[in-house]
Image (cartoon, coloured by chain):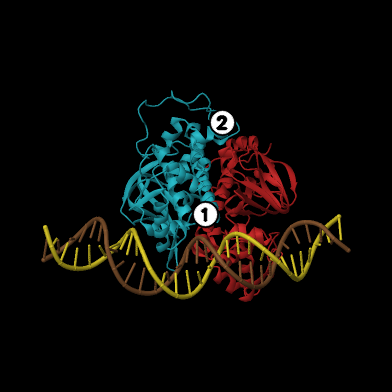
Chain colours: A red, B cyan, C brown, D yellow
Amino acid sequence: MTLQTTSNSFNANIVTLVQEDAHAQTPQEPCPRTGNFLLGRLREKFSRNDLGCIEELIDSERVLQDEEKFVEIGSHSGVCAIVMDGFLVHAAEEAGSRSITAIRIPGDLIDFDSFILKRSDHSIISAGRSRVAIIRHECIADFLNKDPRAAGAMWCSSLLDAAIQRKWIEMFGRLDASQRIAHIYCELQARLEFIGKASSHAVRTPFTQTDLADMSGVSPVHANRAVAKLRESGLGQIRRGTLYPDDWTALERYAQFDSGYLYGQAALNRMSA
Amino acid sequence: MTLQTTSNSFNANIVTLVQEDAHAQTPQEPCPRTGNFLLGRLREKFSRNDLGCIEELIDSERVLQDEEKFVEIGSHSGVCAIVMDGFLVHAAEEAGSRSITAIRIPGDLIDFDSFILKRSDHSIISAGRSRVAIIRHECIADFLNKDPRAAGAMWCSSLLDAAIQRKWIEMFGRLDASQRIAHIYCELQARLEFIGKASSHAVRTPFTQTDLADMSGVSPVHANRAVAKLRESGLGQIRRGTLYPDDWTALERYAQFDSGYLYGQAALNRMSA
DNA sequence: CGTTCCCTTGAGTAGTTTCAATACTTGTGG
DNA sequence: CCACAAGTATTGAAACTACTCAAGGGAACG
């Protein structure tokens, strides 16, 4: 917990006031565990130093097996985490049905809500094997005191998550099952690109068709038919959770996907003209 | 500063890093414009002083007419606001269809995202006449410097909003049209109770059935039938946006409404046992 | 080499959409 | 006060989308 930054003043803006301390740091990658945090999305607004602080918050690592719960609904875990590898999902289970309300990939700060709200209103479950870097709540409290600016990075992260959730609500209102599934893959591809984990010829995920059904709010049987429809339309093939796109452009058009809501670097520059 | 609770120490929590300035303020209600901010929901974690600071941020007031936009999608407004009176909705319009992704009522901090993210990815539109208290981004920047603890109240507010959005996603996956509409009214009633604006025999809103349709992701015609179904089931009658409940308990059960996700005071106490 | 989990397919039912037509409300001007 | 216009609410019918139940096929894993 030693390394506070040189500057912890918060001038004109929680994000932009950086300037001063953008001086160099060690040339090699300083954040082996949190290196993907905010990567590609507003990360340039924070200094290396700020982000290094977050790396220092890490208490330990934890490996989760498929289906293993990181947090249980209603629990007071006392920790949050940054995803290092793999996928997790936010799930709400009730009366036999399961809704997946969010997908988490490396770099995502998860269960941060519990730090403020003290109680989780959903479960976070590993999809396939994953690895997370644990941050204890006590450490965050100190941290927010010492470096409110870097804390802004966490705040920023939760607002980005909220933007994705708004888009999901919008998706539900506008799109049918196969479009929603297409949209989910488009979004994942974009988010994986931010952290340099995307491939142009496949979007690899550990999700079963039942998972896709829970994400898109339809029955597993119908998710299967939606997947079949994408295949038959020549848009892409989903096999064992992996999308092999046949025509990315058409797929994005079909899903009405517009990446603006992810606040990626390129998109930001484009919009702020 | 008489009326803080015995416990307002922010031990491991952003709201607790209090220390310094808990000195007194005027005994009468100090916040004519932001008095509803966080009211009933974690507000006890903040001192009057903190909340008074937020009142101080207000630059001006603005009255919005029905359908008037407070922020336009894609804009850089440079301000955010706290709702004083009336209702607003977050809307995403595209290709002829409109999705309403959130409902804002008095006390809600709106468009705070734009302070961090710099650009709004949705419109915020007044539903009926409303009045908002404007906060300029520049003022927030100073404020975050001077009083990071009170800033935590804003952070807290955005996490509460995110919790509601998660619930909406869950709702979409689990409920049919009439249940969703019932859920929306249950939620509104609970939120209005927090700020002392609820009545036990009616939930008054300015929403048309088309608005309800846009909120619940169905066609206006079907929203009408969903409303009719609630009436015929003896749960409640929706006339001109106002719900006259016939049986609150049954209605909440029908909507599978559980107020925990709103983090109201009572619920919190119940859960943290 | 079978068990298990996942994917696929069919048939009938329920929920939802669209198009279209009809009423009810509210506000406006005559 | 009435007539009218505009917005809002209601209803019907046909088409489509999605659900459930049910059964069968395929791939991975021990």
Say which residue label 1 marks: B175
Q: Is residue A208 visible?
A: yes
Image location of residue A42, percent across then percent down: 57, 54
Kind of residue at badge 2? Phe
Residue at the spot x=53%, y=30% of the render?
B18
**Where, quadrant-wise, is the N terminus of chain B in this rendering?**
top left
Residue at the spot x=48%, y=28% of the render?
B21
Residue D2 shown left or right of residue B184 in the figure: left
Along the line of sight, which residue is nearer the eye, B102 or A146? B102
Say which residue label 2 marks: B10
Of callouts 1 and 2, which one flags the residue occurring earlier in the amino acid sequence? Answer: 2
Residue at mark 1 shares a chain with residue at mark 2: yes
Rounded to the nearest angstrom, the CA distance separating label 1 from label 2 is 39 Å
Image location of residue B128, percent across then percent down: 32, 52
Residue at the spot x=40%, y=62% of the render?
B220
Kind of residue at badge 1? Leu
Image location of residue B273, percent across then percent down: 58, 30
Along the line of sight, which residue is nearer the eye, A30 or A115? A115
Name the chain under label 2: B
